[in-house]
Amino acid sequence: MRRIYFLVPNLSVTRKIVEELLLAKVEEKHIHVIAKRGTPLEDLPEANLLQKSDFVPAVEQGAALGGATGLLAGLVAVALPPASTVIAGGVLLATTLVGAGVGSWAGGMVGMSVGNRRIKEFEDAIEAGEFLVLADVASERVDQIEALIKQHIPQVEVEQTEPRIPAFP
């Protein structure tokens, strides 16, 4: 799956594009609309906190950093005299897993409070009244969906990003 981003000038065109995406067999759970605060989206699928924040990348970074730190702590613990080499593998595994868990938790907490870096570049347009639509589509359908969008907005610039979309949003 790839997430594509594009700006739509008004609510009526946004509604038409979302309907077209639904007719093109893009599930509603894979379509997200972001608008200026206070703008009623009515029946359009609004982006939730996972799309609006940096939660997923922060969890990934936290797990990597925490796991590396846990591994280093395990190596230090094994190097100290009371630790035996017989339990060294268990100590290394345990400290790495605990470090990755704590890092994921801390990263997730930070990521929830930080806005999505990718959406920040669209903030001025959103504040000007445009609508940002995010659609998660299969990699082989990106060109087809882009052509569908261009039928309604010929000058649209479809931004393709995030080649890996997590399965849970």
Image (cartoon, grey):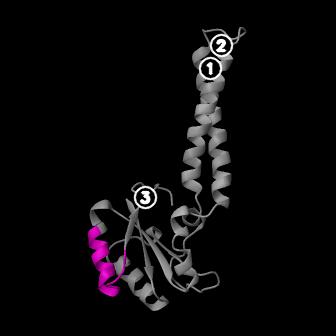
- Residue 1 is drawn in which quadrant? bottom left
Q: Residue at x 60, y 44 (%)?
A: 62
Depth order, front residue of 16/162: 162
Q: Determine whether 51 is above or below 78 in the image.
A: below
Location of mark 2 (residue): 79
Contact between marks 2 and 1 (CB within 8 A): the answer is yes
Within-10-Å neighbours for mark 1: few <14, some 14–19, many 20+:
some
- Residue 157 is drawn in which quadrant? bottom left
Question: Looking at the rendered structure, which numbered label has been put on residue 162?
Answer: 3
Question: Looking at the rendered structure, which numbered label has been put on residue 62?
Answer: none
**Figure label count:** 3
Depth order, front residue of 95/42: 95
Residue 60's x, y, as percent? Answer: 54, 46
- Element at badge 2? helix
The answer, for residue 71, to whether it is visible in the render is yes
User: What's the distance in space between the residues labelled 2 and 3, CA to CA?
Assistant: 41 Å
What amino acid is at disc 2? Ala
Residue 26's x, y, as percent? Answer: 37, 71
Q: Which residues are magenta?
A: 143-157
Would you say 99 lies left or right of 32 here? right
Q: Residue at x 48, y 89 (%)?
A: 10
User: What's the distance in space between the residues labelled 3 and 1, CA to CA?
Assistant: 35 Å
Location of mark 1 (residue): 75
